[in-house]
Image (tube, rainbow, N blue to C red):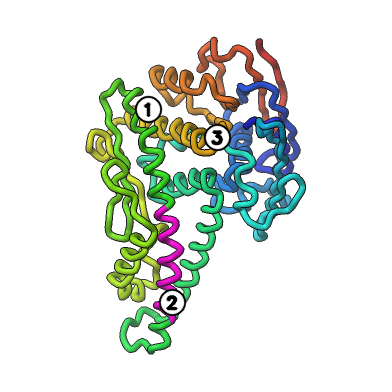
Amino acid sequence: MYLKALNLINFRNYEKLKLLFSKPKTVIVGDNAQGKTNLIEAIYFLATLNSPRASTDTEYVMWGMPHAFVNATVDQMNGSCSEVDVVISPGQAKILKLNKVKKKSYKEFLGSLIAVSFSVDDLLLLRGAPKDRRKWIDTSICQLYPAYYDKFQNYSRIKQQKQAYLKTFNGHVNNLSSMQLSMLDSWNEQIATSGSNLIYLRERFLKEIYPYAQKKCLQISNEEDSLTIAYESTLGFSFLCLEHKLPTIEEIKSKYLQQINNKIEEEIVKSQVLVGPHRDDINFYLNEREAKIYASQGQQRTVVLSLKLSEQELIKNSLGKEPVLLLDDVLAELDLKRQKYLFDSIENAHQTIVTTTDLDSFDSCWLKDVDIIKIEKGKVVDEQKTK
């Protein structure tokens, strides 16, 4: 898979931009706050319809503009090209087009561009909030299983509707009518069915990525750090990727309904949905010790680097497609050992797009045959080809 062209209109600080990618390696250079990260975000957004940086569609759109337009041409490396378009209008559904044909669901759109993004913010993944780790895993899964996004949206709707119904009880757990109890049972059945699918796919993803991440973590640490990943569920169990067999959706649903019954009075009193994937977390252990508490900063960065490179390899082996690799200002945050491992790992990638404030961060050998694009205030001010 190869990104040939990117077009932006009113996206972040880009009023209008067209970039052509002619070489497997592109370095985007510029000072801070000039728009380098916005370019990486636009590409990743087309691949996932999501962004770790944005919580609402309004954030994508240039101030004062009604909508933003993001377009790319992608060589599928099989003799065909795809054109992907997204129109973002805050408060309205995104307009998705694939080869000029409008798509009604996300699963029909996702997969035409596949990308793995590695940014400075990712380096804080272990010490961030649970919602950051949930966003990482949900976004990663969407590229492997495009139907996941629609499943996630469906779960979110059911959760909101159940929460609205819980509020009608005004915190009172006694004297509920049979009709109220029946309606509550119906919401519990729906949310358990939908949520169990999400939990299953999350655990399946972690089970699949774990062998790659464990191997890379051992390589980076010279066999000193052994990685374990655990999915911590509000259903009352911890799923260890190394030790536990992947449960079925039916087994997860059974635990789901049981835990809802245990928490139902608390849910009514608080008017909140307390059980489900929206409250779950992922834990990482190095040498059987919780990494976010006991691991050094360097060790935590080893875990994240292992995860990102494993994501790239898992996608390639599972889908038979090489994802576009996006590196956003991470080199300056990695020590020389981890930089070398990263460069060695991506040497044969089909396409790598990197942002930096300083070309001195790069190995001179890696900079051979690279397109260098300088960005300033949302515009390309210089472009040069190297040999």
- For the residue marked with disc 1, what is the amino acid? Lys
Q: Nearer the viewer, mark 3 or mark 2?
A: 3
Examine the structure image and report whether residue 173 is included in the region drawn in magenta. no
Three-letter amino acid code at disc 3?
Answer: Gly
* Magenta stretch: helix, strand or loop mostly: helix
Write down the residue under mark 2: 186
Residue at x-position 29% and y-position 46%: 240
Q: Nearer the viewer, mark 3 or mark 1?
A: 3
Tell me the quadrant of the picture where the C terminus can be found: top right
Quick one: label 3 or label 1, which is nearer the N terminus? Answer: 1
Q: Position of residue 284 (x, y in %)?
A: 31, 40
Q: Where are the magenta residues, as a range?
A: 183-200
Disc nearer the start of the sequence (3/2)? 2
323 to 359, vertically: above or below: below
Q: Is residue 29 visible?
A: no
Disc 2, SS: helix
Q: Say which residue label 1 marks.
A: 216
**Mark on residue 320?**
3
Q: Position of residue 369 (x, y in %)?
A: 63, 14
Q: Mark 1 falls on what kind of element? A: helix
Judging depth in this view, the residue of 42 and 49 nearest the camera is: 49
The residue located at (36%, 40%) in the rendering is 126
